[in-house]
Image: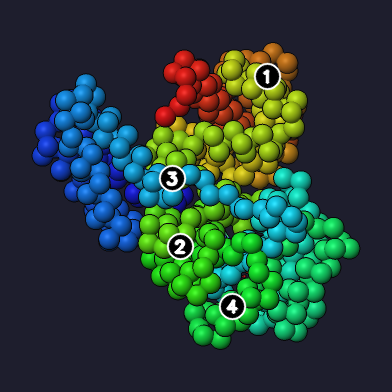
Amino acid sequence: MAFAGLSERLQETFKKLRGKGKLTEEDVNQALREVRLALLEADVNFKVVRNFVNVVRQRATGQDVMASLTPAQQVVKIVHEELTALMGGQNARLELAPKPPTVVMLVGLQGSGKTTTVAKLANLLKKQGRRPLLVAADVYRPAAIKQLQVLGGQIDVPVFSMGEQDPVSIAGAALESTRKGGQDVVIIDTAGRLHINEELMVELERIKAGVQPHEILLVVDAMTGQDAVTVAESFHQRLVLDGVILTKLDGDTRGGAALSVRAVTGCPIKFVGIGEKLDALEPFHPNRMADRILGMGDVLTLIEKAQAAFDASQAAEIRKKLKSADFNLDDFVAQLRQFKKMGPLDQIMGMIPGMDRMTKKMKGAMQFDEKELVVAEAIINSMTPWERRNPERIDGSRRRRIARGSGTNVQDVNRLLKQFDQTRKLFKQFSDWEKGAKKGGKRK
Ligand code: GDP
């Protein structure tokens, strides 16, 4: 999970601070020294770190903080606010043209995930009711055209291609074709190179001049850390970017790129890629990212994911279950299938407050593949209705009988019951959070 190291270190620092009650200026300075080191180790740009720490120090050592009843909490709140500001404050949206089609041009180096991201973005827009057209204008790497066609096929979005012709003509013809095709967003996949070079920049400038895109978005790989920031600076100088899409945030990136790009270049991060699948692209919300970094969980994203994965009636059903924290083995397999639609479980759990630290333990316990789901179903089908309602009372002899009946062994049954128990705990956390959020009003 991205930011794991940073997140752990910051939480450790603030835990120590909380343990102190009243704070002296030296306490705050000590904590800030640790914050500074943690940020530098997460590969955040050193100038960004310096400014960040200075701003936090100024705010945190003010009289109103030091004299308050909960100084440590105030410090964490300030760090949260400043982290959010560092990443741009607000969610920067894709600006759609008042008169369609909106033309979006994706640029980036080879391997950054550009072609995949073109398809992911189309998929996201399609889910929002748009009618995208993909344009294969990466003629430098012929396989890219085929790749885009395959990806387009997977999400059922048309792909415009003219082979290896001049990318400016291709883009122009693609735009023209939307008059007949009726597509309202045109997403252009441009050529990349292994490194920035003049030839690439000139080609991109020509496409820009030719089609005058509404949005030019740079795709960069979060795993490349400060290199991603340097790349963003160079592209921005030549093309004037409207935003950045940071890919591979599902990997164990230290977070430097996410925390520096905006501050260094002034370009907001608009989306983040969080997996190889075509639904693994999310709008970037700085405050939610700050939540995740500080271990406050990211419940809003989780709820949005749940809403996207379930239809309305299922969503109502799951809300009911979450509230009562009462679901039985009958529901279990159905829930697992639904959760599977939301994405990898470890990612989901990282978003639940307090759950990030449990993730490692639960990850192993809750990873189900399709085959395991079938086994789980077989086991549950071999239980009596009483057993399904009272899983904690299934003793050894019942376990043996269930294993025989389902063609599995006792270890399989044990594992399933353990997984069930942990899932129930997960739901309990969820419902406690819901109750807390209601009582406390708006979350912050
Ligand atoms: P391009 O050369 O920039 O067009 O890059 P591709 O779109 O071909 O992607 C390069 C590799 O990165 C592929 O294996 C993608 O599946 C992978 N990739 C792209 N985005 C992500 C992401 O957000 N997470 C992960 N884990 N892999 C990604």
Amino acid on which disc 1 is placed: Arg
Q: How many marks?
A: 4
| Distance between the alpha carbons at the discs numbered 1 and 3 | 48 Å
Amino acid on which disc 4 is placed: Glu
| Distance between the alpha carbons at the discs numbered 2 and 4 | 27 Å
| Mark before the other along the chain sequence, 1 or 2 | 2
**What percent of the width, then of the height, locates residue 67?**
16, 25
Mark 2 Cα shell of 10 Å, populated few (<14), some (14-19), many (≥20): many
**What percent of the width, then of the height, locates residue 46?**
27, 61
Tell me the residue that label 1 is attached to.
388
Picture quadrant where residue 348 is located: top right
| Distance between the alpha carbons at the discs numbered 3 and 2 | 23 Å
Tell me the residue that label 3 is attached to.
89
Q: Residue at x 75, y 25 (%)?
A: 313
**What percent of the width, then of the height, locates residue 63?**
16, 30
Using the image as rendered, state which of residue 442 and residue 275 is in the foreground: 442
Q: Is residue 276 left or right of residue 267?
A: right
Tell me the residue that label 4 is attached to.
205
Tell me the residue that label 2 is attached to.
223
